[in-house]
Each structure stands twice: as structure tokens, then as C-alpha cells.
Image (spheres, rainbow, N blue to C red):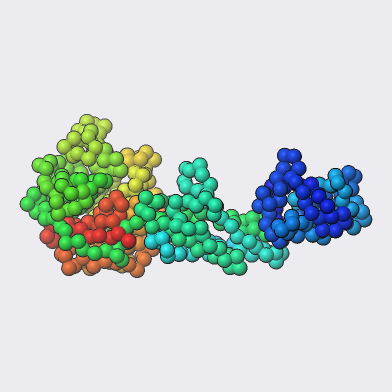
């Protein structure tokens, strides 16, 4: 296997017809070492010296800057030419490097989505092993970039999502990756693996996801809760403000949404009714099953079980339901689910407001895509769904903020079930993760759940007691 580099051309200091000692880089070029050639690399080279020329495979030795030659053809009847003071040598390719040479093939292929550990020390692995049909040894490398970013990262300039440079088993093609333990580095990284036979390179891009929270395996009850029954009974849903300063509950008995302020952000036990209520009986229906907001708080969405739809309400002041826009264009856009199912138990939105997910009482989550973000009138069924067969009583739906996990509270089992999505935001790729969390010690009949924006707090709504209980799910 020969190494290929760019713009590597040097003068020959000495050596005649034997091992050459290399001199300075030629004008406009760089030395072999500066181009990335390291000790004992094999190079396809060409030497020119006046009318004499030679092509071969050389072995580079960093100490002494020498190149041992194995000639393949030359102007000297295939023998080494005798290099004089004007000889120059450069790294190149020959015809045989292409003849019959195929690109390496991944045996996997590698995973398209991989969740990083976020403790700064525990590695996850990405199997990117590949083979060359001609039996040429394969070497591995990588680079990475953020979506929409202008920086290309590598081992010399690490992306923020990684705690250290990936280690690569060159014999097996397995990459070991350690995620950052710093929450500010949360995000998704495009990680490109490269498998090369020295001439041709196969590549594969995997999404590496670093996130904090959203792990119900580590959930613990915080002994914090709030009873909403003094304002409405039969609460069916709750939603938390992005900054944790406000929350809303939907009440079945009152056909309304109630607004509360939290004196301590994200602490549900500090909630206090701020005397703002908005009836939704004339617009959404008479059995509201959940409530949620757009990412900027300018729109509120209420699902209704009986009318099998979600209704959009535009707010003239974000995150304040007293500012309902009652104009014809700002009030009452609806998405009907009747073609796909009946009895809507809950809805959730993607963080970019382009997808809405609706849960049927029969236990299927349906995905709808919006061509205009947040606008229900542009939503159509995406022909993607997931049957949640682990329970007979699913009551709500929530997703993590990168769309790789889905959570379903179930009133019959008094549990929350977790599902993993192999393609972010594509509910058709959801599979049960074999993870669930029992909330029966707090109350029966969980009907809805939401997370704080950072995923560190989970809030479960219970129909039996009209309470919301708070759990820590930080990892």
C-alpha cells in the first residue's frame, strides 16, 4: 500500500543510483514530512534529472531524510538512474495504482446514529471495518463537522462533543469514542470514517449525539409535586415553559387550559395559579387530552380526544395564553386525525416545529410533517407510525430534543416506556429500548409527561389525583 500526499516535491541532495538523501523542497512545493509522510511510509515516486526519469516505490526514513528505492520502470532500461545535482523527486501515482483497484467495502455498514456517553470517560464503539477485494491492507482515519458549521475537525482539532481523540484499532476498524462531560457541548456531530487502501477511500458519515438527561433508567423522584385540583379536575396534560418559569395544564372537566407561574424555575412545587384561564371548548373540543407549545411560545396546540384533532391557537404575546389571537387567521387552525385513527390521547412537536406526533387510544403514534414550521394547516400524514405494543393503555407522547428517544406514559401499568429512534424524528424507526420507569409509588393513572428543555427533569401528570410529579433524569 502506497501513501498519497499533496504537493510533495524535493531536490535530491545525494545518493547516485542508491538510497537517496533528500534536500530542500522545490519552489512552490512542500517537503515529504510537511505533506504528511512519516517514518517507513511507502511512496510511489517519480525522479526527473534532465532527460532521465525513474518511477518506483520508495521507503521513507525520517531520520536522515532518506528514501530507499525499488524501481518499477525508468529511462535506464528499468534500472535505477544515477541522480545528479539537478535531480528532483516527487510523490505521484502510477497506472498500476488504478488498474483493477476497487474502493474498500464496509462490512457493516457502520451505524448511522450513535449516542455518546456524556461522562468524559466511558467509550462507545463504532464498527467501521472494511475490506479490499484485492487483499490490500486497509487503514482508517476520520474527520467531523457540525451541521451547518464551517470547521472541519480532526485529531489535531477536536470537536466539542468529544472528550478526547478517538482511538482506532487499525486491525479491526473499530473506533472508540468518548463524549464530553460538559453540558455546554451537547449537540449532534457529523462523524466521517475513512477506510483507505492507499489509493481509494470509502467513507461513511455517522451522527454522533451528545445529550444530557432524557434517561429514565436514572430517574429519581424529587419529592416535588403540585396538585392542580383546586382549579380544575381531571387534568389530562401539562407543558413546561422553555425556561421553566411557567407551566400550563389542560383540564377535561373544564374544557380549558390554565396558566401557572413557578417562583423557582423548573420546580413544580413552586407553581402558583396566575388567574389566567383560556376555554378551548368552542375551538379545540370538549375533551382536551394534552397541551403543548411551539419552540418560541407563539403558538399553543391542544389535542382533543372526542373530536380526533389538534387545534392551533396563535398568541400575540409568546408564552401567555391571555393573549389569544381571536382573528380569523390566528385562531383555530386544525389538524384532523380522523383518516388515520380515532380518540387522540396526546400530541408532541419536534423542536424545530416541523413535525407533530399524535397518539391514538389504540396504541399507535402517528407522524405528521408541516411544510411551514408550526402551521397545522400545512401538516400532512407522513405515512410513518409506531405501534406501542408493550402496553394496553398508552396515554401521552413526548420526545427528547434531538428526536432519538420517545416516551409513552401508560395508565394501566403506571409506567413510562422508552423507545429509541434509529433515524432522528422518524417515528417509523422507533423500537422499544427495554427501559421503563415505574411511577406507581407516587400515584396511579399517568396520562401525560413532559421534560424540561435540558432533559434533566421529567414531569408526569396523573389523572387519578390531578397532580404533576417531578423526577430528576440527569445522567
Q: Residue furthest right?
A: 77
Asked whether, in this view, residue 261 is left or right of residue 358, the answer is left
* Coordinates of residue 379 in the picture (x, y in percent): 35, 43
Q: Residue shown at 74%/57% (left/top)?
A: 64
Quarter of the rendering occupied by the N terminus: bottom right
Please determine whether, in this image, residue 316 is positioned above or below residue 430.
Answer: above
Question: What is the number of callouts on the image?
Answer: 0
Q: Quadrant of the C terminus?
A: bottom left
Above or below for 39 versus 351:
below
**254 on left or right of 119:** left
Can you give x and y, in whole percent of width and height, for residue 445 in the image? 18, 63
Of residues 58 and 82, the one drawn nearer to the viewer in this rendering: 82
Comparing 366 with 187, the one in front is 187
| Picture residue at 19% right of the left edge, 45% below the top | 246
Is residue 331 left or right of 152 when viewed as pictured? left
Residue 334 visible at all: no
Which residue occupies the foreground of this view, 81 or 421?
Answer: 81
Q: Position of residue 95 (x, y in %)?
A: 79, 53
- Farthest front residue in view: 64
Q: Residue at x 92, y 56 (%)?
A: 77
- Whole-percent x and y of residue 293? 26, 44
Residue 349 in view (yes/no): yes
Q: Residue at x 30, y 55 (%)?
A: 455
Amino acid at each position: 500500500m502506497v501513501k498519497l500526499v499533496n504537493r510533495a516535491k524535493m531536490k535530491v541532495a545525494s545518493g547516485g543510483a542508491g538510497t537517496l538523501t533528500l534536500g530542500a523542497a522545490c519552489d512552490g512545493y512542500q517537503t515529504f514530512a510537511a505533506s504528511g509522510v512519516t517514518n517507513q511510509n511507502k511512496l510511489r515516486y517519480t525522479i526527473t534529472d534532465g532527460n532521465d526519469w525513474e518511477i518506483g516505490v520508495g521507503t521513507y526514513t525520517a531520520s536522515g531524510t532518506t528514501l530507499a528505492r525499488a524501481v518499477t520502470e525508468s529511462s535506464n532500461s528499468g534500472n535505477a538512474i544515477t541522480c545528479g545535482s539537478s535531480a528532483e523527486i516527487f510523490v505521484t501515482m502510477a497506472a498500476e495504482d488504478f488498474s483493477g483497484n476497487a474502493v474498500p467495502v464496509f462490512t457493516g455498514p457502520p451505524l448511522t446514529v450513535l449516542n455518546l456517553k456524556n461522562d468524559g470517560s466511558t467509550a462507545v464503539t463504532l464498527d467501521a471495518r472494511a475490506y479490499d477485494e484485492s487483499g490490500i491492507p486497509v487503514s482508517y482515519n476520520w474527520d467531523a463537522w457540525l451541521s451547518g458549521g464551517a470547521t472541519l475537525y480532526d485529531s489535531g482539532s477536536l470537536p466539542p462533543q468529544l472528550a478526547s481523540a478517538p482511538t482506532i484499532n487499525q486491525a479491526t476498524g473499530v473506533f472508540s469514542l468518548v463524549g464530553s462531560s460538559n453540558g455546554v457541548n451537547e449537540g449532534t456531530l457529523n462523524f466521517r470514517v475513512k477506510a483507505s487502501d492507499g489509493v481509494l477511500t470509502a467513507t461513511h458519515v455517522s451522527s454522533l449525539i451528545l445529550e444530557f438527561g432524557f434517561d429514565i433508567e436514572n430517574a429519581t423522584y424529587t419529592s416535588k409535586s403540585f396538585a392542580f385540583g383546586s382549579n380544575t379536575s381531571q387534568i389530562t396534560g401539562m407543558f413546561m415553559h422553555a425556561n421553566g418559569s411557567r407551566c400550563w395544564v389542560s383540564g377535561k372537566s373544564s374544557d380549558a387550559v390554565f396558566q401557572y407561574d413557578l417562583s423557582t424555575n423548573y420546580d413544580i412545587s413552586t407553581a402558583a395559579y396566575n388567574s389566567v384561564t383560556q376555554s378551548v371548548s368552542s375551538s379545540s373540543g370538549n375533551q382536551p387530552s394534552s397541551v403543548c407549545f411551539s419552540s418560541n411560545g407563539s403558538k399553543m396546540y391542544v389535542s382533543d380526544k372526542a373530536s380526533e384533532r389538534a387545534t392551533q391557537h396563535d398568541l400575540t404575546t409568546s408564552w401567555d395564553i391571555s393573549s389569544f389571537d381571536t382573528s380569523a387567521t390566528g385562531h383555530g387552525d386544525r389538524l384532523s386525525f380522523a383518516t388515520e385513527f380515532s380518540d387522540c390521547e396526546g400530541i408532541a412537536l419536534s423542536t424545530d416545529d416541523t413535525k407533530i406526533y399524535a397518539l391514538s387510544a389504540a396504541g399507535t403514534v402517528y407522524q405528521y410533517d408541516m411544510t411551514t414550521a408550526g402551521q397545522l394547516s400545512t401538516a400532512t400524514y407522513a405515512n410513518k407510525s409506531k405501534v406501542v405494543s408493550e402496553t394496553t393503555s398508552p396515554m401521552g407522547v413526548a420526545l427528547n430534543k434531538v428526536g432519538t428517544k420517545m416516551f409513552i406514559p401508560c395508565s394501566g401499568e403506571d409506567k413510562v416506556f422508552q423507545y429509541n429512534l434509529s433515524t432522528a424524528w422518524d417515528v417509523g424507526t422507533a423500537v422499544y429500548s427495554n427501559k421503563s420507569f415505574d411511577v406507581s409509588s407516587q400515584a396511579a393513572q399517568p396520562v401525560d409527561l413532559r421534560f424540561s428543555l435540558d432533559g434533566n427533569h421529567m414531569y408526569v401528570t396523573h389523572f387519578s389525583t390531578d397532580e404533576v410529579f417531578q423526577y430528576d433524569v440527569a445522567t
